[in-house]
Amino acid sequence: MNPETANPNEPAESVDSAEDRVRIFDTTLRDGEQAPGFSMDRRAKLCMAQALETLGVDVLEAGFPQASPDDFAAVDEIARTLRNTTVCALARCQNGDIDTAARALERAHHARIHLFLSTSPLHREHKLGMSKSQVLETAVASIERARKYCADVEFSAEDALRTEPDFLVEVFSAAIAAGATTLNAPDTVGYTTPAEMVELFTYLRKHVRDAHKAVFSTHCHDDLGMAVANSLAAVSAGARQVECTINGIGERAGNAALEEIVMALKVRAPHFGLRTHIDTRKLYPTSRLLTQVTGQAVPRNKAVVGENAFAHESGIHQHGMLKHRGTYEIMRPQDVGIAETTLVLGKHSGRHALRQRLETLGHTLDEAAMEGIFKRFKALADRKRDIRDEDLEALALGQDPDAIGPWRIDQLNTTSHLGGSASATVKLCHEDGREIGEAAIGDGPVDAVLRAIERATGTDMVLKRFQVRAMSEGGDAQGHAQLTARHAQRDWNGSSVSTDIIEATAHAALAIVNRIERQVSDNPAAARMSQGVIA
């Protein structure tokens, strides 16, 4: 994926508008991840990327390489790892962005550069300060530059649904002539309706010059709750790529939900007459994996993958289901990867049963990882009578290698006092042989533990976000603690799982300390760079 190896003269793929396959473009790791509360570290992104490739997505937007060194590194690692899915990097129509995206994709097996530029009157005036001719000239120059690196170039007209249709035709026609192979008309602010979507895509496919040389794409936001409906409307009008995210995560109210679009096309196949490459049996495991790595649960009533999607409590519904399940279920739970029976695991279970259940949940592990998980599974089984799927998913997440060492907790004690205050004592051991004990008083046990760890390690941290979520049911449920702390003008994330939430919090805080110390010791220059943000 560089000027020497790419073939910029390769002609754009000829696309028959009657083609019966819809390409699934997943942007969970880019548009989804940039939403507040859904930030993922590099390890989590790679884990999700591998799951999305197994799911069968055609294109995976791995990130915005120009945004930060971490984003660049994540795109680079994902590009090197995936074999079948096209890895895509986002870039503004700026030379620096394009060159950085190309470098991040150099080792990709299949690569795409995704350019975007606003085209609506509102954005031209208030965001870009550009005339129509300047927008057109910038788009063409950027596409031509990207084509020098990569034969697969997508162009997005940001805020397309509020752009004059005739100008959108002009921009898209020029984009095809410059070498763009995919044209995306996004509903950037979730403003349009299905009828308007059909009208626009019908107009574009009729009037854009050489429209048959490009795939038309739709990217809908959910501000008015119509993202999936608008995406399907665009598909019915000839769009053959849908940009979407797992669980519908994304900016503001989110994006169109991948699982809903895919199952709508499958369940209503006689109506749409279209197919995807998605293995729908992997939808639920992939959805659950995302909730684990972000700590953000799916609403119970979420379509397709919510806990209530295949649950029936109403007596009338239950009676109908007993007579014939088709009375109230339009798809089988097995079709999306939800098993009707649950394998109950406990302290007498062996490796084979554990591996089988983990694979059912979407976790494929090598022997070394399996050995570590099995040991932790046995230790957990001694404390819990039954191990639930949520517990297994917590075990499969394990620990981030970057968060392990040089510090570890040797002792931890907390005491709560009348009036709401608490004290904590910790004894920490460093890999260089140091042993440090500290004590602190805080507003509560969590605050006290964080203060004690700060004192012991000499690392200043300002807590930005703290969340504890039960991984399963019952008094012996594991708690998943997630922390975000500010250090040296950068936010750092740490997480841990334990049946004791104070212990989970302490390990999550120490993971942040270890990650900071590892990065500083391994690459001081990179650490200094990461303290800033590239605009």
Image (cartoon, rainbow, N blue to C red):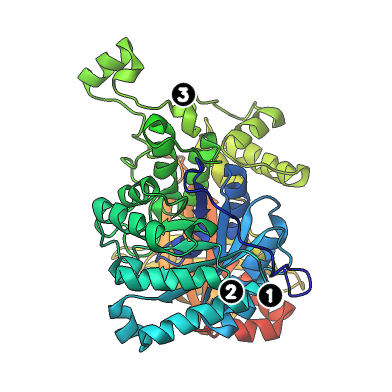
Name the one closer to the observer, 189 or 350: 189
Up the image or down, 364 lies above or below 85; here it is above
Question: Distance between the Cα atoms at labels 1 and 3?
Answer: 46 Å
- Which disc is residue 340 wearing? 3
Label 1 sits on what residue type?
Arg
Q: Position of residue 83 (x, y in %)?
A: 71, 52
Q: Secondary structure at mark 2?
A: helix
Label 3 sits on what residue type?
Glu
Up the image or down, 201 lies above or below 127; here it is above
Which mark lies nearer to you, 2 or 3?
2
Residue at 34 percent of width and 28 percent of height: 311
Name the one closer to the observer, 121 or 222: 121
- Which disc is residue 65 wearing? 2
Looking at the image, do the residues carrying marks 1 and 2 touch, with CB atoms under 8 Å apart? yes
Residue at 53 percent of width and 34 percent of height: 281
Label 2 sits on what residue type?
Pro
- Which disc is residue 452 wearing? none
Which mark lies nearer to you, 1 or 2?
1
Q: Answer yes or no: is residue 6 visible.
A: yes
Q: Is residue 488 left or right of residue 147?
A: left
N-term-proximal mark, 1 vs 3: 1
Question: Distance between the Cα atoms at labels 1 and 2?
Answer: 9 Å
Which mark lies nearer to you, 1 or 3?
1
Q: Position of residue 392 (x, y in %)?
A: 57, 40
Q: Residues within 10 Å of mark 1 (few under 14, many from 20)?
A: some
Q: Is residue 517 left or right of residue 198?
A: right
What residue is disc 1 on? 103
Q: Position of residue 231 (x, y in %)?
A: 36, 51
Up the image or down, 172 lies above or below 82; here it is below
